[in-house]
Image (cartoon, rainbow, N blue to C red):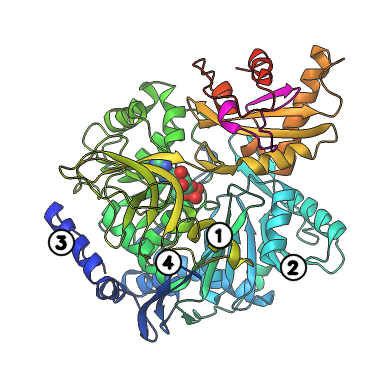
Amino acid sequence: MIDLIHDLEGYQAEYQRSVEDPEGFWAGVATGFHWQKPWDRVLNWNFEEPSVRWFEGGLTNLCYNAVDRHALRDGDRVALIWEPNSPNDAPRQWTYRELQEAVARTAGMLQAMGVQAGDRVCLYMPMIPELLWSVLACARLGAVHSVVFGGFSARSLADRVADAGAAVVVCSEKIRRGPRDLPCRAVVEEALDLLEAEQDHPVRKVLVQGSLDPSKPLRSFSNIQSWDWDRLWDQTTARPQPRWMDAEDPLFILYTSGSTGKPKGVLHSTGGYMVYTAYSFAQVFRTAPGDVFWCTADIGWITGHSYLAYGPLLQGATVVMFEGIPTYPDPSRFWKICERHRVSHFYTAPTAIRALMVHGDAPVQSADLSSLRVLGSVGEPINEEAWQWYHRVVGGERCPVTDTWWQTETGGILIGALAGVSPLKPTYAGRPLPGVQPVLLDPQGRELEPTDPPSEQEGLLAMRFPWPSILRSTWGDHERCRTTYFSPFPGYYFTGDGARRDADGMFRIIGRVDDVINVSGHRLGTAEIENALNRHPRVVESAVVGYDHPIKGQGIYAYVILRSGLQDLDADSENQLIHELSETVVREIGAIARPDRIQLVEGLPKTRSGKIMRRFLRKIASGDTSQMGDTTTLLDPSILDAIWAGRKG
Ligand code: WTA
């Protein structure tokens, strides 16, 4: 088990030790887990290739450590509490022993379908226990899971399945979210249509949970077998034992957006991810047996992977998993769930806080939140107003709010307060966790040395030393991993974020410095949205930027040039076209990428060499009326006036 840091001096001492002797430090943490065979070497790394290997030669299994280990020792402890979408349906719960049985049985099902270690399995499912079991079952078998968030479109799903080379897809009949059911199996069928039409694709087997027709869970496709979850469940007698995997064997792929091109499959490996998610969970949230931890993120995102599925279970915590949305049936739902399950630790995104804040204090006060002790925030910068409301109204001024900064690529929280130990400063994520060595760089890649006396500094956030759960590669394209994260500033992992460090060494994350936007805590590449818009037959070119949005953090603003120009376009056909464009993006990517504003324009501000100057577009999108600054580099500066005149907002 992990020794918790007790106070600030303890943090400083542990941090010091982690920097002076990283190998000794992490070896010490790693001994708290079960290893079937100890590692030969703690760390072997270079950031040039990059190649990072932690606990090489060690054999372990993440599912064993997260589930079996607790089932054997303390099997009656509650592992999972599941709250269904409808408040009228009864919640369900599983002890660690019951979870072990469910996960082993799911592993037996996957095995019966032919899944073996190293195979990629795509999970496209709602927030139901079967999703968590499937994740853990893959880990048990040594198969590599690739969870695709249920809100992604058939196109996005098809691209991810093809890129990962997943032979098996697990899905559900439908997704219950709020008042409506969304299709799930039908989206998989649509994705298979797309795959069949285009290329020779990897999918051979599809497992459908909750099918309406168990004898034929999926429409028929050549070369694809379909299976019904319930039938297979009933037939499965095998309970495969955890397969011992090398620490550096891949654990999962999770697709995330970057500034260019298609999403990349961030690859995490077994041992380092296990050690770091458990360590960071323990130190930041500090749960004790009997506590109830609720992370509201969907398992389709990294937060759900690391702090719903793996981190808390590795620590033997009791986790809540919620199928629905915060505002259904009304905006008190989150708080009612906290009351019902006596949630002690609550972890959510600023966008949810802001969306609920709009409904005032009454919905919060309608619930008994006396069980809450620690609040967490993740995914995007938290503004002061949201922080204060969260602290005062939700936390009754007695719960520390830990603002945790990290990324899909980092696997776990790198910067954040240790709840109740670290000082809190609203809008500041705070100090790095032990083992994490952040630096601020100038645009030339020189480290900003702390000044004497210390002062506030701002720069590009990078890491100069690996932590155990750093990404190992981008699936199928290692070069892309290198050029995206390691070659911009040789010798460093570059985060893509800008940050400020105050005189006390606390970090405040400012936001992305690349063309990635953060919409309701979801990461989207502006290039991806542009590509989607450009698929519409009437579009010649488009440019997408983010702008400040009071609830979503950032909204999506799209400028679109039509083939036919803007003449002869009356208001009705303009509205119709804007609607079609919006639907095109939803169809190509998913509803999370639906533009908030679409403006049809005659031209875009470009330099003589044809580069779009997004800086100007951002200014217009945000309604910033101050001077545009230097427009002399533009081929046609007058275009800005025309765009400004037709601005949406
Ligand atoms: C942003 C989510 C400010 C940041 C875990 C990062 C944050 C991107 C915070 C990663 C935070 C995440 N404060 N910004 N506490 N947490 N971000 O991969 O820009 O979905 O680079 O991982 O979200 O998003 P991702």
Q: Is the magenta stretch mostly helix, strand or loop?
A: loop
Residue 109, image x and y in percent?
63, 72
Alpha carbon of mark 4 to alpha carbon of mark 2: how far? 28 Å
Judge by depth and name the residue closer to the eye, 69 or 569. 569
**Which quarter holds ligand 1?**
top left
Q: How far apart are marks 3 and 2 (CA)?
A: 52 Å
**The residue stretch that appears in magenta:** 596-616
Does the image show residue 377?
A: no
Q: How far apart are marks 4 and 1 (CA)?
A: 23 Å
| Disc 1 residue type (three-letter) | Thr
Is 604 inside the magenta-drawn segment? yes
Q: State which tag comes first along the sequence, 4 or 1.
A: 4
Q: Which amino acid does label 2 sit on?
A: Lys
From the image, which quarter does the N terminus lie in? bottom left
Q: Mark 3 points at which residue?
A: 13
Q: In this view, does 310 lie to the left or right of 165?
A: left
The residue carrying pointer 2 sits among few (fewer than 14), some (14 to 19) or many (20 or more) residues within 10 Å by Cα, namely many
> To which residue does mark 1 refer?
483
